[in-house]
Image (cartoon, rainbow, N blue to C red):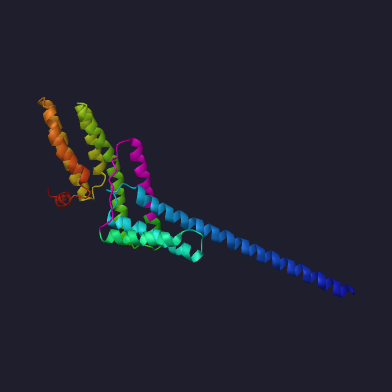
Amino acid sequence: MDTTTIVLVLAAIVTVSIVIIVISQMRERARIERARKITAQEDAYNRAFRLLSEIPGQYLTADLKLVLIKRMEEACNELAGLKSGLPVKQWQDSATDLKKQVMEKRDTTVPVKIDSPEKSNYVKELLQNLFKMIEAMHKSGRIDAGTAKKNLRYVLFLVHKTHADLHVFQARDYVRQNQIRKAIHAYHLASTEMGKSRDNPLAMKAVKSFRTRIKELEAMSAEGKDGQYHESQSQLDREWDTFLHDDEWKKKADYDD
């Protein structure tokens, strides 16, 4: 074999080796990218499912539920295209069924009491994650500007309500212990929190309700009738506990009252 032939053979071997290495690298990069996309979409599905499952039921409107379900469906569609080994079909069927229940108003709502700072902070964290998710969906064109703006404003209102819920719970506890001044202060804090959502008529109605509670509590305390407060307290408490879903509150929630 002459020198030229040897050089050509070696060159061919080197070329083939380079091609094999390049192809291997491309396949590895494609594998890594596919794994990254699968992980990202799995995380997106799990985040949406977690928010739908763990945010207190009384906070989630039908619109918010549908936004979360939409994100779950999008993640499932991406995962189906990536042919992941995850139970995507099961997730898709579950999301479709849940969406139908929400649209037909057959889904269950489980209220959760905000009765500790830890629970208040945890719910606040969930709501902040929901806010970021809606923002990301808007930026990526998954939801329109009007839908995003409406839901983002409502989520901010819920963050304020979470803190107000805690203050109300504390105020009730103070009343039971006959610590009236502390109860009044807690109601003031609840009113301040709801006042941060001045663009929400329902929040303003809640502020007026808190002011009424404070005046009644102050008057009864001054007259030495603390024990008589409990009956009035009970009615006002029921209104607060249900005001997100109470049609009467919503009908009264305007700025002309």
Q: Nearer the viewer, residue 109 or 10?
A: 109
Quadrant of residue 140 within the rendered picture:
bottom left
Residue 185 in sight here: no
Where does the N terminus fall, quadrant-wise? Answer: bottom right
As drawn, which residue projects farthest toward the top? 224
- Residue 248 is a magenta residue: no
Where 162 sits versus 30, above or below? Answer: above
- Residue 117 is a magenta residue: yes
Residue 199 in the image: state x and y as whole percent: 23, 50
Q: Which residues are magenta?
A: 105-133
Residue at image location 11% in from the left, 30% down from the top:
228
Residue 52 in the image: state x and y as whole percent: 35, 52
Q: Nearer the viewer, residue 221 or 92?
A: 92
| Residue 2 located left or right of residue 8 | right
Residue at image location 20% in from the left, 29% down from the top:
176
Quadrant of residue 113 within the rendered picture:
top left
Where 24 sits versus 128, above or below? Answer: below
Quadrant of residue 92 within the rendered picture:
bottom left
| Residue 54 located left or right of residue 192 | right
Q: Tell me how many marks there are.
A: 0
As drawn, which residue projects farthest toward the right? 2
Where 53 sits versus 221, above or below? Answer: below
As drawn, which residue projects farthest toward the left? 223
Residue 67 in sight here: yes
Q: Nearer the viewer, residue 189 or 233?
A: 233
Residue 202 in the image: state x and y as whole percent: 20, 49
Residue 63 in the image: state x and y as whole percent: 29, 57
Residue at image location 35% in from the left, 62% down from the top:
96
